Amino acid sequence: MKRRIFIKKTLKGASIAILSPSLLTACDKETAPIDKSVIVIGAGIAGLAAAKKLKEKGFTVTVLEAQDKVGGRLRTNRSLGVAFDEGASWIHGISGNPITDLAQQAGMTATLSDDANYAAYDLGGIEISDTVFTNTENELYDILDTLATHGNANKSFETVFFEQYPQYANSRLWRFFLSTYVTFDLGDLDQVSSLYYGEGEEYGGVEKIATNGYDTIPQYLAAGLDVQLNQRVSAVDYSGSKVRVTHNGAVTEADYVIVTAPLGVLKHNSIQFAPALPAAKQTAIQKVGMNCVNKFLLTWDTAFWDDAFFLIYTPETKDKFNYFVNVKKLNPSTNALMTFAYADYARQTESMSDAQVISDIMAHLRDMYGSSIPEPTHLQRTKWNTNENAYGAYSYFAVGTEPRHFDDLAAEVDNKLFFAGEHTEPDYFSTAHGAYLSGIREADKIIDLQ
């Protein structure tokens, strides 16, 4: 399994040395110029990793970014005086993970994500005992080890799970675990593949969560690069000897183009390709799933909640504000909580007003801590599903997705058109480190052509 499921099961409490490979280090030297040009579409971590490596190898590299800043889905909002990471927050397994070194080089600070430090509540503010919580968690791990043996190519994880374990269909605690341990990590429970939900590799070691902003990494990678902001690419023509990229009505040519647009953008056909992309790639774009996770940061003048790293609540509605990060543990001078909405409920929140969102979150917190707790002073939120630069959070194995589809997404076309991004990384899809590794991979392909 991925992320916290794997790490908590196998490495909880372990002390593991950091053995992170230095794929791009501060001491890399630029080589003699190469008379070849590359356009990188997208200044997320994949595009910046590719651009940095290619520039260091002597290529002329231009990065076209639709947004007004670099980072893509690594976005940090500091308008309230605290770093609110709208996209990635965690380093998932620090041992051998390239993000570990990058974070150090970029000046990103992070702290242990202490999953064992939690307070859990059921409806009515009734505390859930550690024994009940841990026993349920361990049973979920055991189920995840074997559920795929009952999997079916045409059935979702949700369908097969409740066929095998109908006794949990009405359990709020099981609803919480399936939401925050499966839907959060993998994708929509009613669409996740019951065969391939466990695909992918994980780095060992503990998890860490950024404290001063994940965007320090893309800012570090972008230093010295030719990044052109507010340049929305609408077309890529690779029919000639040069690739022609249309952006903001202008056309720029290059020998090679790397497309790092998110899977959601590709699904929306936001970029027109000529000739049309190969059938296998088009099929993969449609078959691979795109999850939606939205994040919400609320601040108060004073803290009223438990002095725990995570606060857990088991509401009736699945995927709805059931998991809170105590931001005060990350920044002691800040009284804030960060919570989440997943899958269809996450998409639903995007049509809700701030007042409606606050009302629903506060209903949960007041059930946990009493009706007298104060209203928050501020709210920050994301709307990833309707964000035209993402149209979702990250990719996953949906019903109908096969491992080859991730390879098809990564396949180059005519040795001129290349594709990077978390959705193109078969082993580490849906992660920041997967996106980074994909950028290095595509840069290496172009280097090897010389």
Image: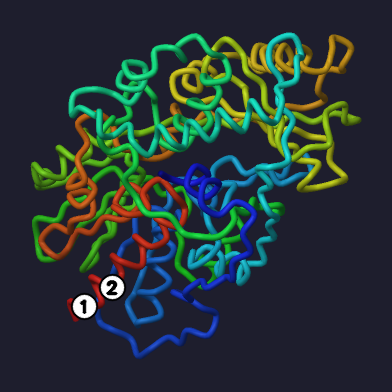
Q: Quadrant of residue 354?
A: top right
In the rendered view, tell whether residue 69 sits above or below residue 399.
below
Element class at badge 1? helix
Q: Which residue is mark 2?
A: 444
| Label 2 environment density (alpha carbons within 10 Å; few <14, some 14–19, many ≥20) | some
- Which disc number belongs to residue 88? none
Position of residue 9 measured from the top left corner of the image (x, y, whole percent): 52, 46
The foreground one among 301 and 139 is 139
In the rendered view, tell whether residue 376 sits above or below residue 92.
above
The foreground one among 128 and 392 is 128
- Which disc number belongs to residue 448? 1
Confirm or deny contact between disc 1 and disc 2 (CB under 8 A): yes
Q: Is residue 146 left or right of residue 352?
A: left
Position of residue 50 measured from the top left corner of the image (x, y, whole percent): 37, 66
In the rendered view, tell whether residue 280 sits above or below residue 187.
below
Q: CA distance from mark 1 to mark 2?
A: 6 Å
Q: Is residue 26 left or right of residue 132?
A: left
Element class at badge 2? helix
Label count reads 2
The foreground one among 44 and 431 is 431
Q: Is residue 225 left or right of residue 239?
A: right
The foreground one among 267 and 292 is 292
Q: Residue at x 79, y 45 (%)?
A: 329
| Label 1 environment density (alpha carbons within 10 Å; few <14, some 14–19, many ≥20) | few
How has the structure been colored for display? rainbow
- Which quadrant holds the C terminus? bottom left
Q: Amino acid at mark 2?
A: Asp
Q: Amino acid at mark 1?
A: Asp
Q: Residue at x 51, y 78 (%)?
A: 25
Position of residue 244 measured from the top left corner of the image (x, y, whole percent): 21, 57
Position of residue 78 measured from the top left corner of the image (x, y, whole percent): 71, 45
- Which quadrant holds the N terminus? top left
